[in-house]
Image (tube, grey):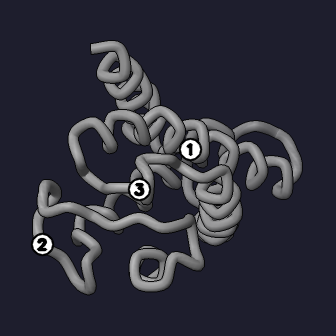
Amino acid sequence: MIELIGVQTGILFGNYKYSNVLSEGVGGVPLIIGVNWFVIVVSSVSLFINLRIQLWLKVILSGLTAVLMDFIIEPVAIKYQFWIWENNDVPFYNYVCWFIFSAGFSWLYISFKPEKNKTAFVLYFTWFVFFLILNFI
């Protein structure tokens, strides 16, 4: 829903649209984007879930880690035209919204009291290195 609102109004994240590279979707949002959000949030939470720190700190750290992943993905997504930003410029507001929503989703996910997801833990670093390398190719 947040991506649909973002694409249709520009209120969330800034002015952008998805190309057909990631497939057709609903209201201009490819279905894989929901999976992307889920994977990034779960993998970010997996980095901190077992730390003996307060819940609010886990949520903040997970949100920041998700934003870091988005920051690494953005140049690759633009290069391969997964999505297109107005003037090819990713607004800082995008990262603010990413933090707010990913921290909120992290809190929601943590409230279900999950165990550490070892696959998601490894997946975060795999995606990070993968997109980091693509930034230099």
Query: Which residue is denoted by mark 1 in the rendering?
Result: 44
Mark 3 or 1: in front is 3
Q: Nearer the viewer, residue 66 or 106?
A: 66
Residue 18 position in % (x across, y down): 27, 64
> Does residue 13 sit above or below 64 in this rendering?
below
Query: Which residue is denoted by mark 2 in the rendering?
Result: 24
Query: Could you tell which of marks 3 and 1 lies nearer the N-terminus?
Result: 1
Q: Quadrant of the C terminus?
A: top left
Taking the image as drawn, is residue 45 in sight? yes
Q: Quadrant of the N terminus?
A: bottom left
Residue at 40% from the left image edge and 35% from the top image edge: 75
Outermost residue to the front:
87
State how far apart marks 3 and 1 are (Cα). Answer: 25 Å
State how far apart marks 2 and 3 are (Cα). Answer: 18 Å
Query: Which residue is denoted by mark 3 in the rendering?
Result: 85
Location of residue 102 (image quadrant) = bottom right
Along the horizontal axis of the image, is 89 left or right of 34? right
SS category of the residue bearing label 3: strand
